[in-house]
Image: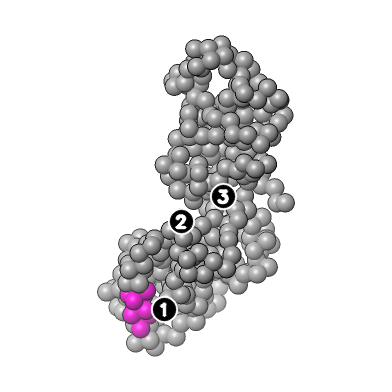
Amino acid sequence: MPVVKGNAYGHGLAAIAQIVQKQADWLAVVNVGEALALRQAGVRKKLMVLGFFDPNQISLAVGKNIVLPVYTLTMAKQISAAAQAKRKTFPVHVKLDVGTSRLGLRPEKTLAFLRQIKKLPGLRIEGAYSHLADSENFDQKYTKLQVEIFTKTLELFEEVNIKLRYRHLACSAATLINSQTRFDILRIGIGLYGLWPSIETKKLYEKKFNHFTLQPVLSWHTRVIQIKQVPKNTFIGYGCSYRARRDTRIAVIPVGYWDGYDRGLSNRGEVLIRGKRRPVLGRVCMNMLMLDVTDRPNVRVGDIATLIGQQGKESISAEELAEKAQTIHYEIVTRIQPELPRIIV
């Protein structure tokens, strides 16, 4: 079940779905809006909403065969009513909370909940799932505990004679390094895009298996729009956070925090031009940033500037930007503005 939520982790929802549906059994999204967008784009694979949905969209979901989660009796009743109105039996997956303390039903509440929703007409409880909180780390103790809680909670379905077709728990990290987490469906998220869930996951995988490596599928490019010379001691950018230490040649590129280039990269980030790293000068603006190209007199307007990706022997990764911006690479790629064009090569 490739996870294409969040605009396919910033990579482009419809474009990625069109590619991965050829090898997928399901596709996972975060809400009904994303699922409807995929249906409109011609995706016919099974779709599952992993998170919250607006009750007003239930009828649409039932009509488009979009599988929904249930974790409250109110939600189950709403789905039941919509299914009956369309004279359908609609599949749902019970969302369990086995230690992440996010969406889902706590184990001690599960049995009573199952007894209640089992009676509702129009519902077919075909699956149960949960999410892991710490599967990316060296220490797998908490993951082991969550697997145990999940497995024990699944026994409650049997107690009320509900036969599950699908049970799913594993994310990218768990799929790679922990076979205990693999049930009937594997939800592959960050790894689908060639990004390791964490450094720890990569090291654990290489230590145990090392069958393959992951290569990022996304690169991010723009072009230089202006070159200018400023004298020594000139302030550059908002807040006067940088003062030129020498006569400085600046390249301006049309990317800023609106586009998803983190403001935390102000005076810290680097961009590749003509195969060399060029430092960001001053604060990242909403739609622009400035680069020091003093030592590269051959840089010209129109040159390709690479924010993520490779030029020659040099490369800049989402992980590198995340470290400099004090965040995670998930955020770096998912924050790339959806309106920017994604070009499939």
Q: Nearer the viewer, residue 165 or 202?
A: 202
Q: Position of residue 332 (x, y in %)?
A: 51, 45
Picture layout, residue 110 above or below residue 50: below
From which residue to which does the magenta span run? Answer: 147-155
Task: Decide if residue 84 is in sight here.
Answer: no
Decide: few, some or many residues near mark 1? Use Cα within 10 Å; few <14, some 14-19, many ≥20: some
SS type, badge 2: loop
Q: Position of residue 221 (x, y in %)?
A: 65, 39
Q: Position of residue 187 (x, y in %)?
A: 51, 67
Look at the image and tell me in which quarter the N terminus lies.
Answer: bottom right
Q: Any magenta on residue 194?
A: no
Q: Nearer the viewer, residue 73 or 303?
A: 303
Q: Dot 1 corresponds to which residue?
A: 120
Distance from Cα at disc 1 to Cα at disc 3: 38 Å
Q: Dot 3 corresponds to which residue?
A: 10
| Viewer-nearest of discs 2 and 1 | 2
